[in-house]
Image (tube, helix red, strand yellow):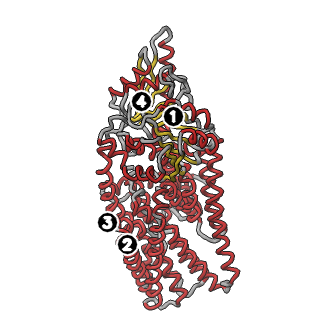
């Protein structure tokens, strides 16, 4: 290719095509955000402007189509990955109800409109209705940016998407099979059996494969990313094999990997970065390039069909959101957010109309295709704008609840140049840290003065530099300090006072102190001279590979003044580990332990059981806890409520009986009200 041909229109040089796309992804959102418009609308509209149906600068060729399809698959995967899985399963019935309403209401209205307004046959009208009965999460990047994807109403909407799209695509399969004369018993057997094997296979195999991989592979971090991408696209292809859209497989892949990928870790940051910077913008650009404004002048039937589609999708999607909101008590702004998020139309709608056109379904002609493209354009502009408007108000309410409390949380991680598994300590600190907190993680090394102090300080600073580099992968700020002190514990305690630390995260070295023999001399001194929440941990592997979190609850621990704060930290930790929770009450009733959890508004979703005494607990640890489990023991400082002499040797017993990781949580003994507020709101 010579230099002259590279500048012919449409641009065909792959380097220049990619360069133009990058410029669009950079400039369009910045320009539109300046005028308080969603950035994704800018990418879509600029795609329409430079696409083959307007200026013709870029052609919607194989490369754009491929990257656009990858972008949609990636978008659905991220939606499944970032959803609050506990809330998703807790409200699964609500997702099902919304998904059914969001499908049935448009399907019914669209079928009637297709028959009586457009004169279609009933099968063709059913297929016409399925075009807008489905929806694409076009505005998900807006919801994600505003931090509202964990709001219950948004979770219900995202969860309902998979049911809505699956049902719409099943209508397509049935109508096409009927048109081709293959709608027989064998068709239904293949469809039902294929779907059952697909869902069961992914749900059973992928989590086990993921847990094995994260436990055994500790090479460069990009291998983790490549593993996740492999799972994503294999699941997407498997969905295609059984006759449903790849986006269904992508969303399911996100759900099954959800617990294995920490929300605020380096791996999640890489996944989001690649998606937001590259793949998802290509999907938006591809959608924009579909738009043919000239279709408006193509004839009155195109405008009639487009008008029916736009009015129907607006009315029916709002009605479905409103009915769900009234049924479950969602606020008006949440209903508006549900409506905006479910309004988007793109891939599924386009697939349905194009397949109907290719098969020759009655009424599915070029005018129908153009009308659907116009509807996609309208939805692409309206959906992000509605979500932006509603999302800001939803986020404002949430921020009011946590902003003040989060500003008081300060986490300190003391480290030694000899400390192993430093990255795991940082992961633990990140897992209990409020995501919206602007406070950095404090990392501290305390060096005893001596002849080679300079050398040891240099070594300590090198360790801290590694910690900063690791945390940067998760976009987490780390403030490092090295201080000289003849007493390491005094250095840690003084740093806690100077920095107004609320939480200490300390690695357990396995040593015993002469006096208490609980968790080590330095740690015992820190516990004795502080009143803050302290987590003492022995974590050797990634938290996301945890099979089960076993929470040990000593008798009367719920009467400790810092119980609710410690429970909040455990809730954050279990969320980060992404594993099921098993709470074991020692010497008190499991039902009473459950009530204690619920009384402080705990979000820890746990199964409760009890053991009669400490001996029974040790037997349980020895016989019923595997190396893949994380043991979290809530303990107490000597002299505080909930202290028992057995707690003095329990950490050492746990380390002896359990091959896996463990954390001992010491509640704050003088907890502040703002800390309790923060920890209850998790």
Say which label, 2 or 4, has the lower sequence index. 2
Label 1: which secondary element: strand
Please tell me whether mark 4 or mark 3 is closer to you in this view: 4
Residue 178 is drawn in which quadrant?
A: bottom right
* Mark 3 touches mark 1? (CB < 8 Å): no
Please tell me whether mark 2 or mark 4 is closer to you in this view: 4
Residue 54 placement (x, y as % from top left) = 45, 68
Residue at 49% across / 30% down in the picture?
648
Q: Which residue is mark 4?
A: 638
The residue closer to the viewer here, 42 or 444, is 444
Label 3: which secondary element: loop
Give the spatial CA distance, label 2 vs label 1: 45 Å
Relative height, residue 56 to residue 446 (above, below): below
Give the spatial CA distance, label 4 vs label 3: 47 Å
Residue at 50% across / 28% down in the picture?
518
Label 4: which secondary element: loop
The residue closer to the viewer here, 157 or 90, is 90
Give the spatial CA distance, label 4 vs label 1: 19 Å
Q: Which residue is mark 3?
A: 331
* Mark 4 touches mark 3? (CB < 8 Å): no
Residue at 52% across / 61% down in the picture?
76
Give the spatial CA distance, label 2 vs label 4: 50 Å
Q: Which residue is mark 1?
A: 537
Question: Local crowd at mark 2 within 10 Å, few (<14), some, or many (≥20)?
Answer: few
Please tell me whether mark 4 or mark 1 is closer to you in this view: 4
Residue 425 placement (x, y as % from top left) = 50, 34
Relative height, residue 545 to residue 483 (above, below): below
Say which label, 4 or 3, has the lower sequence index. 3
């Amino acid at each position: 290719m010579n230099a002259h041909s590279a500048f012919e229109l449409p641009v065909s040089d792959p380097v220049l095509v990619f360069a133009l796309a990058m410029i669009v992804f950079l400039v369009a959102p910045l320009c539109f955000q300046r005028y308080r418009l969603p950035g994704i609308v800018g990418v879509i509209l600029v795609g329409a402007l430079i696409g083959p149906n307007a200026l013709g600068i870029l052609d919607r060729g194989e490369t754009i189509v491929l990257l656009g399809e990858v972008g949609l698959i990636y978008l659905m995967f991220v939606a499944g990955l970032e959803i609050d899985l506990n809330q998703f399963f807790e409200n699964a019935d609500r997702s099902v109800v919304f998904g059914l309403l969001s499908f049935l209401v448009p399907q019914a209205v669209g079928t009637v409109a297709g028959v009586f307004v457009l004169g279609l046959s009933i099968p063709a009208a059913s297929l016409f209705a399925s075009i807008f009965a489905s929806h694409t999460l076009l505005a998900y990047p807006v919801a994600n940016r505003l931090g509202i994807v964990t709001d219950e109403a948004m979770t219900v909407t995202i969860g309902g998407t998979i049911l809505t799209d699956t049902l719409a695509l099943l209508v397509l399969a049935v109508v096409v099979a009927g048109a081709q004369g293959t709608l027989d018993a064998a068709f239904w057997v293949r469809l039902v059996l294929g779907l059952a094997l697909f869902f069961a296979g992914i749900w059973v195999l992928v989590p086990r494969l993921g847990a094995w991989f994260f436990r055994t592979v500790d090479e460069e971090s990009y291998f983790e990313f490549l593993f996740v991408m492999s799972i994503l696209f294999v699941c997407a292809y498997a969905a295609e094999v059984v006759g449903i859209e790849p986006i269904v497989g992508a969303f399911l892949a996100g759900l099954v990997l959800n617990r294995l990928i920490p929300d605020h870790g380096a791996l999640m940051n890489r996944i989001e970065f690649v998606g937001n910077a590259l793949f998802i913008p290509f999907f938006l650009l591809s959608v924009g390039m579909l738009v043919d404004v000239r279709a408006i002048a193509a004839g009155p039937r195109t405008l009639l069909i487009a008008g029916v589609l736009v009015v129907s999708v607006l009315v029916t999607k709002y009605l479905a959101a409103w009915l769900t909101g009234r049924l479950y008590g969602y606020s008006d702004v949440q209903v508006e957010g549900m409506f905006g998020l479910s309004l988007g139309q793109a891939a599924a709608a386009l697939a349905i109309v194009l397949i109907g056109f290719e098969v020759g379904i009655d009424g599915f002609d070029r005018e129908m295709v153009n009308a659907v493209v116009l509807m996609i354009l309208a939805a692409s502009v309206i959906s992000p704008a509605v979500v932006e408007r509603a999302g800001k108000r939803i986020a404002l309410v949430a921020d009011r609840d946590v902003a003040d409390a989060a500003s008081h949380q300060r986490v300190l991680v003391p480290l030694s140049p000899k400390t192993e598994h430093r990255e795991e300590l940082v992961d633990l600190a990140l897992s209990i840290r409020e995501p919206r907190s602007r406070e950095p993680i404090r990392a501290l090394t305390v060096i005893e003065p001596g002849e080679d102090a300079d050398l040891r300080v240099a070594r300590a600073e090198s360790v801290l530099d590694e910690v900063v580099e690791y945390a940067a992968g998760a976009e987490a700020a780390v403030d490092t300090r090295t201080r000289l002190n003849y007493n390491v514990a005094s250095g840690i305690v003084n740093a806690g006072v100077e920095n107004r630390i609320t939480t200490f995260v300390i690695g357990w070295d396995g040593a015993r102190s002469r006096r208490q023999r609980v968790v080590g001399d330095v740690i015992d001194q820190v516990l004795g001279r502080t009143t803050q929440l302290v987590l003492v941990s022995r974590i050797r592997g990634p938290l996301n590979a945890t099979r089960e979190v076993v929470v040990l609850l000593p008798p009367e621990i719920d009467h400790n003044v810092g119980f609710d704060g410690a429970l909040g930290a455990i809730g954050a930790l279990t969320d980060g580990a992404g594993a099921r929770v098993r709470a074991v009450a020692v010497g008190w009733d499991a039902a009473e332990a459950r009530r204690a959890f619920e009384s402080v508004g705990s979000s820890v979703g746990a199964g409760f059981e009890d053991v009669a005494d400490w001996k029974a607990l040790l037997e349980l640890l020895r016989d019923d806890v595997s190396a893949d489990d994380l043991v979290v023991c809530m303990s107490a400082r000597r002299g505080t409520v909930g202290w028992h002499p057995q707690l003095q040797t329990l950490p050492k017993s746990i380390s002896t009986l359990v091959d896996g990781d463990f954390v001992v949580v010491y509640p704050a003994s003088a907890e502040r009200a703002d800390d309790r507020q923060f920890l209850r709101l998790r």
